[in-house]
Image: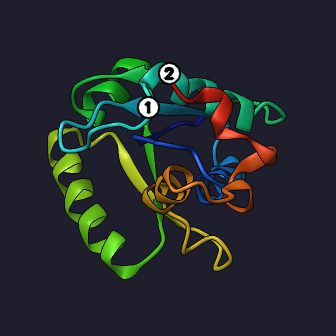
């Protein structure tokens, strides 16, 4: 059974994330969406709310689970027995950053392989940062969210 971890802060989970996840499901038997604590980012939604948003977004998909974790992603992969890390790419800038992280992870744990999946061109412009900005300023975020998720019900 091929298990992959799809890690991120997912603050919030968007159509772009869902697009990458659907592509990954074609490659892997099981995917764990792992909501990590990133010390470089202050979260808009608490982790518990992010997990709820993701669960609501993926409710119709099989073989997908959602968990949170702390520490290194590579350590989490080894803990849950995942041999793959899924990383979504929107731009070449994303690739450059993700390549460095993948190389470091490979050095620390050669048994885990990072797989890069580009988002579809129709989702490449969507970022959690943009969605949060639209939300905070009272704009309509529904074009960016899976399953018509209304983030206002998750706000503090």
- Under circle 1, the secondary element is strand
Quadrant of res 91: bottom left
Question: Considering depth in this image, is 128 or 64 the residue closer to the camera?
Answer: 128
Crowd tier of the residue under label 1, counting other residues whose Cα lies within 10 Å: few below 14, some 14–19, many 20 or above: many
Specify the quadrant of the image occupied by residue 110. top left
Total marks placed: 2
1 or 2: tag closer to the N-terminus = 1
Residue 36 figure quarter: top left
Q: Secondary structure at mark 2?
A: strand
Along the line of sight, which residue is nearer the eye, 60 or 4?
60
Q: Position of residue 25 (x, y in %)?
A: 69, 47
Which residue is nearer to you in this view: 114 or 151? 151
78 shown above or below 133:
above
According to the image, label 1 marks what residue? 35
Which numbered circle lies on residue 67? 2
Report the residue at 45% width, 57% height from top. Answer: 115
Nearer to the camera, 6 or 30: 6
């Amino acid at each position: 059974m091929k298990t992959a971890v799809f890690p991120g802060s997912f603050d919030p989970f968007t159509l772009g994330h869902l697009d990458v996840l659907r592509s990954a499901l074609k490659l892997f038997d099981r995917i764990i969406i792992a909501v990590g604590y990133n010390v470089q980012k202050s979260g808009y939604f608490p982790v518990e709310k992010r997990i709820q948003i993701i669960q609501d977004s993926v409710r119709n998909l099989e073989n997908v689970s959602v968990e949170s974790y702390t520490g290194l992603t590579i350590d989490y992969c080894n803990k849950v027995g995942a041999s793959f890390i899924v990383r979504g790419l929107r731009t070449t800038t994303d690739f450059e950053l993700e390549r460095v992280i993948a190389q470091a992870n490979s050095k620390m744990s050669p048994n885990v392989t990072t797989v890069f999946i580009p988002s579809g061109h129709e989702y490449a412009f969507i970022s959690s940062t943009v969605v949060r900005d639209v939300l905070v300023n009272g704009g309509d975020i529904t074009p960016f969210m899976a399953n018509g998720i209304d983030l206002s019900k998750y706000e503090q």
